[in-house]
Structures are given as C-alpha cells and as structure tokens.
C-alpha cells in the first residue's frame, strides 16, 4: 500500500542531537497532541452537524436557505473524512484497490458551495466517467484547482469545468479567464500546487498547466479511466460464459 503521512514539524537541532529516549518522548508528546486535537475537532464537527440538521428541519426556511444548510452538512462530512485520513496517515490510498470514483459527481459536489457563496460564473460540462483514483484524494485535488481558478477569475470572471472520457483516460479540464499562471513564481511558494502535484503523482495521473481557452489559466488532469458499466457487464457475461 502506498501511503503518505501528513506533514510534520521539522525537528530542531537540539531535538536531533538529543538522546534517543528524549526523542521518543517528543514523538509521543506530538502524537498525543494530534490525537487530542482530532478528538476536539470531531466534537465540534458533531455539534455543527447537529445544529445544521435541526436548522434544516425548520419550517421558516426558504429553498435557498435550506440548500445552504444542506451544503454546510455536506462540507462537514468532507472535513470529517479528511480528518480521518490525517489520523490514519493515509491521505492518498492506492489507486488500484478494485474501486473507482465518478469524476463528474465529485466535480458537481465541489461546485455546489462555490455557486452558493460566490458570484463568479462557473459552468460544468460533464459526462459520466469513472477513474481509478481515491475519492477523497480527487476531492482535495479538484478543490484546490477549482478554488484557485475561481479566485483568479474574480467575482466578474468565468470558470469552465469539463469532465469527459477520451480513449482510456478520464479527463478533467478547468479553465478561467483570470491573469494566467506563472509556474516560476508559484512552484516554490504555493502549498496548493504542492498538494496537487503530490496527489496527481500518487494517483498515477497526469497534470498539465498552461494557457486555457479563455486566455487565462488552463489545467488538465488525466487519470486511468474505469470501463463504462455496460462494458463491465458485457465482460462479466463473457467471463461467466
């Protein structure tokens, strides 16, 4: 299994030179702090989810407010999954575990809170396509890319997301009409870009960044596509025969 541990604090020179028992004590203390923090965050997430659930059942909410409350619940569920991944230190599970993820559904999930809270014109042109990539890893990856595109485009800008299948690949393209992308400036300073590169590498995908169709930044992601459901059914029928 290929795993990736969350970033840890770099030991100081004194800690590196300390005797082994003292170093182990530092590691145990940091582990305990992480567990306590995770425990407290889960309590707060649970409180938020209970309050949002109660609010969602209120009779005095209009359709727009009810949708926003529902999105709060959806976002807390994603956060709960991310917290679990950090605690288990498996942020990027293996890609070939027999399961696949619907790219179009994850893209739509990411767009809901953006459309509810931002004025940027965001379009989604998606066909049903699955790929061998972990669902949480894909959410983290696309969330970074799409939010960067929305920030670059601004409130009066435009972002287009396309999800489709091309041969044996599942493709996601994100274009914005912002000022564009300077890899020389972003490569060493962008934590989001570092996360994206890391997730693409562990997911055995391909990442291309350049000028997009709106003369802003264009990002293209390619993953190994899962076969369509009907193809899988035909193959299972042939194997059974």
Image (tube, helix red, strand yellow):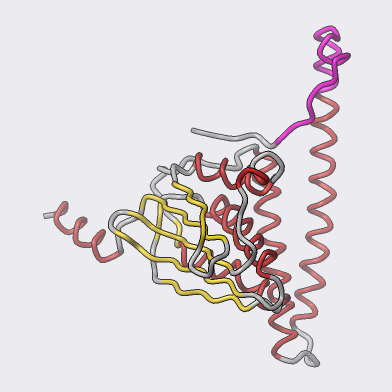
Instruction: Tell me where residue 225 appears, x and y as whole percent.
Output: 35, 54
Residue 72, by quadrant, is bottom right
Residue ranking furthest to the right: 14
Residue ranking furthest to the left: 241
Instruction: Tell me where residue 113 appears, x and y as whole percent.
Output: 67, 72
Left or right for 163, reference 138:
left
Instruction: Tell me where residue 157 appears, x and y as whole percent.
Output: 65, 75
User: Which quadrant is home to the C terminus?
Assistant: bottom left
Instruction: Tell me where residue 23 appears, x and y as whole percent.
Output: 82, 15
The relative height of residue 216 versus residue 29 in the rendered view (above or below) is below
Q: Which residues are magenta?
A: 7-27
Q: Residue at x 50, y 39 (%)?
A: 202
The relative height of residue 17 versus residue 133 in the rendered view (above or below) is above
Left or right for 72, reference 142:
right
Q: Residue at x 58, y 53 (%)?
A: 141
Q: Indicate yes or no whether the magenta region holds residue 85.
A: no
Nearer to us in this view, 108 or 221: 221
Q: Residue at x 48, y 49 (%)?
A: 207
């Amino acid at each position: 299994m290929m795993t990736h541990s969350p970033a840890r604090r770099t030991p100081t020179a004194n800690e590196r030179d300390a005797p082994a028992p003292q170093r182990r004590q530092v590691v145990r203390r940091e582990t305990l702090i992480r567990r306590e923090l995770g425990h407290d965050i889960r309590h707060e997430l649970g409180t938020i989810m209970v309050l949002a659930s109660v609010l969602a059942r209120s009779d005095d909410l209009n359709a727009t407010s009810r949708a926003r409350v529902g999105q709060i619940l959806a976002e807390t569920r994603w956060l709960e999954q991310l917290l679990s991944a950090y605690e288990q230190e498996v942020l990027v599970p293996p890609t070939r575990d027999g399961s696949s993820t619907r790219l179009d559904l994850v893209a739509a999930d990411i767009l809901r809170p953006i459309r509810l809270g931002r004025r940027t014109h965001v379009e989604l042109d998606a066909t049903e396509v699955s790929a061998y990539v972990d669902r949480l890893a894909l959410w983290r990856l696309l969330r970074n890319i799409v939010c960067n595109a929305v920030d670059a485009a601004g409130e009066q800008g435009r972002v287009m997301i396309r999800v489709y299948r091309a041969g044996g690949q599942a493709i996601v393209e994100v274009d914005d009409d912002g000022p564009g992308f300077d890899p020389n400036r972003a490569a060493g300073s962008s934590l989001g870009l570092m996360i994206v590169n890391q997730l693409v590498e562990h997911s055995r995908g391909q990442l291309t960044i350049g000028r997009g169709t709106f003369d802003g930044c264009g990002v293209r992601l390619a993953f190994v596509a899962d076969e369509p459901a009907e193809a899988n059914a035909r193959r299972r029928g042939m194997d059974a025969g």
